[in-house]
Amino acid sequence: MQKITLLEVSKLLLKNDNFHILTHRYPDGDTLGCAYALCFALRALGKKANVKISGKLPSKFSYLAKNYVEQDFSCDYVVSVDVAAMSLLGELEDEYKDRINLCLDHHGSNTMVADNIFVDASCAAACEIIYVLVKELGVKITKDIANALYTGISTDTGCFCYSNTTAQTHRIAADIMKNECDFAMINRINFETKSRAKLKMERMVYDTMEFYCSGKCAIIYTTLAMQNALNAGDDEMEGLASIPRQIEGVKMGITMREKEDGTYKVSVRTNDGIDACAFCKRFGGGGHVAASGCSIKGDMQTVKYLLIKAAEEVL
């Protein structure tokens, strides 16, 4: 296992063929944007490449696969994108855990095991890395690649509102927008459009909100019963984690999502420089300073107690 430069990454990609590109579980816009952009770029070079999604492609991101057709070949080279830890591969872990040749990521907490690793924590989204890589490979940014890259960058920055957004982020987005990118459609789908089921879920979630640490910490949750009552899937769950942080005076917003395996998926969003990554590392998770996550096994009251105690120590 060795850390390499982006130039070395491009040489490896040019040297090899027959790629499987892996996403993380509960796939979001960044991991999917990376995977499809890199896949289309490799195919433009005459190589064979397929995207392997942990779970299923959320319906809201179906436009990314509009011109994608699965290719038939035997995999020789495995690349993970926007995956910070082996456990985040989800259902892909068993098949690929000992086969990852290259890891591309922007999480400073990355603990992936791969032959070669490139991590740039200064990037707001992993798609910023893929953008530079596409340029390094000499591939023209087509409409499909532009849409994938813009999706990753816009969703991981909250449509350029989050504190991880940099001047470089804007420069990259501006260049992508020159290449027939459907940015208005992508923004509308990801930031303005909600299903009725999602609206109902948000209403239920607001009723679960509790405040701790003199109002500096807000916690919301979803249970399997709530999800089943609304027949809610991942599309309805996405974006809920941003709700508690939006409340005035809240420095740490915590979202708990009950899973069928007896664990709670915990998402932490913070304001005012509170380190969400350090907080989640207490429970074996990680991510970014202002947005991180972890999984905790236990019933709701036990998990909530652990989170509140940890929040009290931080705040």
Image: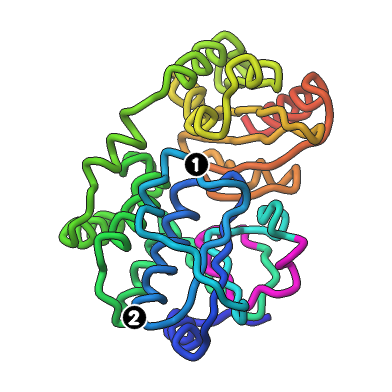
* Residue type at the position of mark 1: Pro
Residue 277 location, x and y as percent? 60, 47
For the question of whether residue 308 can be seen, the reply is yes
Q: Quadrant of the C terminus?
A: top right
Nearer to me, 116 or 216: 116
Q: Which residue is mark 1?
A: 58
* Residue type at the position of mark 2: Glu
Report helix, strand or loop for mark 2.
Answer: helix
**Few, some or many residues within 10 Å of mark 2 (<14, 14–19, 20+):** some
Q: Which residue is mark 2?
A: 136
**Few, some or many residues within 10 Å of mark 1 (<14, 14–19, 20+):** some
Q: Quadrant of the N terminus?
A: bottom right
**Residue 154 horizontal side relative to residue 245, left or right:** left
Q: Residue at coordinates 23% horizontally, 49% vertically from top-left? A: 182
Measured Cα–Cα span from mark 1 to mark 2: 30 Å
Q: Residue at coordinates 58% horizontally, 50% vertically from top-left? A: 287
Asked if residue 260 is among those painted magenta in the image, a careful observer would answer no
Looking at the rendered structure, the number of numbered marks drawn on it comes to 2
Nearer to me, 57 or 217: 57
Asked if residue 107 is among those painted magenta in the image, a careful observer would answer yes
